Amino acid sequence: MSSRRRFITTVVATCFAAARGGARAEVTYPAVTPRPLDFPRDHGSHPQFRTEWWYITGWLRDEAPSAGEAPRDLGVQVTFFRHRSGVAEDSTSQFAPRQLLFAHAAIADPALGRLRHDQRAAREGFGLAQASEADTDVVIGDWSLRRAGTTYVAQVEARDFAFALDFEPRAPLLAQGDAGSSRKGPHPGEASYYYSHPQLAALGSVTIDEKTHAVRGRAWLDHEWASEFLAPTARGWDWTGINFDDGAALMAFVIRDTAGRAYWAGGTWRDATGRVTTLRTEDVRFEPQREWRSPRTGIGYPVAMRVVAGELTVDLVPLFDDQELDSRASVGAIYWEGAVRALRGDRRVGQGYLELTGYGGRLRI
């Protein structure tokens, strides 16, 4: 373990020890109320809010496979989380865990048949972990996600993989919900500020087993922040972001209650002409088509899913089944997050990601 990794681990241990010790002052988190998104400011961090994440998923393909090798598809995912802990906010100590940062990265590699995954966690500060308020610029050690001009730049050095990828917009940003205020339940406080950037052109390199592959593909970015996100009766959600081959884009989600029933839903459909349709609860359904059960956790996930979004119906089929992600060492959840193809009948019409949470118990972030 490098000295930097040891230091980050020590800081995280200190943060969680403080949190368990109850060093919590009275904290007021701001509510999400409808307002116009403000750029470039809203690309950056919002430290007064409880929880925030920047989330990129995409499909990549080898630019130049080795002799005798066929081009292969890879899924890629990187997420940076920021959490205002409410702990020791009145402390002057540099070790006070006022803002915690976490990150996940994964490569979905069909040759391996499961995710290559790694994660990071740190208290903000000491020049090792930070989330800028001015623009997207989130760093934990040697992991980073930044915006350079209009291009997102991701750098990850993980245990058994690495990637250096640029994500350049090929379509406009997409505000979710009511001009960027996205409801997650029947009560006004159950909401987030939320925008997406579909149809990102991905270009760069991925290193697996000490071999570097030049890759290109398409990706999707979500940026979301909130103070009160899910109702106490919520168990988890199903979510998808799909880049269609004709330039269209779909985000859709369903939130399930503790009995497993869908009680809230939403999303946005932007067709190939640029026309945007906001999807309400009655417009969205996720219909499981096939279950896969994890040999490690015993959790069953509906990894093949039919999504009905207004007048659109697509079938989502996984790149491969075992894309379970165990993040108990950081944000504390086990869920399925995988690369999927979007089909109409037998014809592929797009690619994206499907996220399935709360199937092993109520999701707690």
Image (cartoon, rainbow, N blue to C red):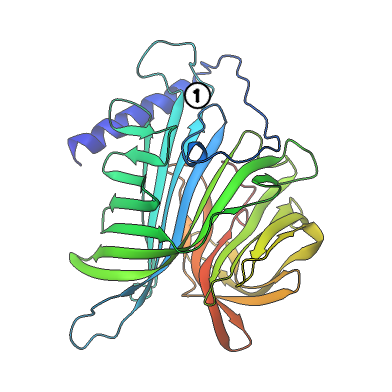
Q: In this view of the protein, which residue sits in the foreground, 27 or 235?
A: 27
Q: Is residue 264 left or right of residue 64?
A: right
Assign a secondary structure to mark 1. helix
- Residue 34 versus residue 241 in the image, above or below: above
**Quarter the C terminus occupies:** top right
Regarding residue 223, the answer to whether it shows in the image is yes
Q: In this view of the protein, which residue sits in the foreground, 83 or 289?
A: 83
- Residue 141 versus residue 273 in the image, above or below: above
Q: In this view of the protein, which residue sits in the foreground, 341 or 196?
A: 196
- Residue 168 versus residue 341 in the image, above or below: above
Measured as percent of width and height from the top left, residue 37 is found at 60, 41
x 22%, y 35%: residue: 4
The tally of labels here is 1
**Quarter the N terminus occupies:** top left
x 41%, y 18%: residue: 96
Circle 1: residue type: Arg
- Residue 176 versus residue 87 in the image, above or below: below
Give the residue at mark 1.
Answer: 20
Classed neighbour count for the residue bearing mark 1: other residues with Cα under 10 Å, few (<14), some (14–19), many (≥20): few
Q: Is residue 63 left or right of residue 23?
A: left
Measured as percent of width and height from the top left, residue 59 is found at 42, 69
Measured as percent of width and height from the top left, residue 291 is found at 61, 72
Measured as percent of width and height from the top left, residue 334 is found at 52, 52
Regarding residue 253, the answer to whether it shows in the image is no
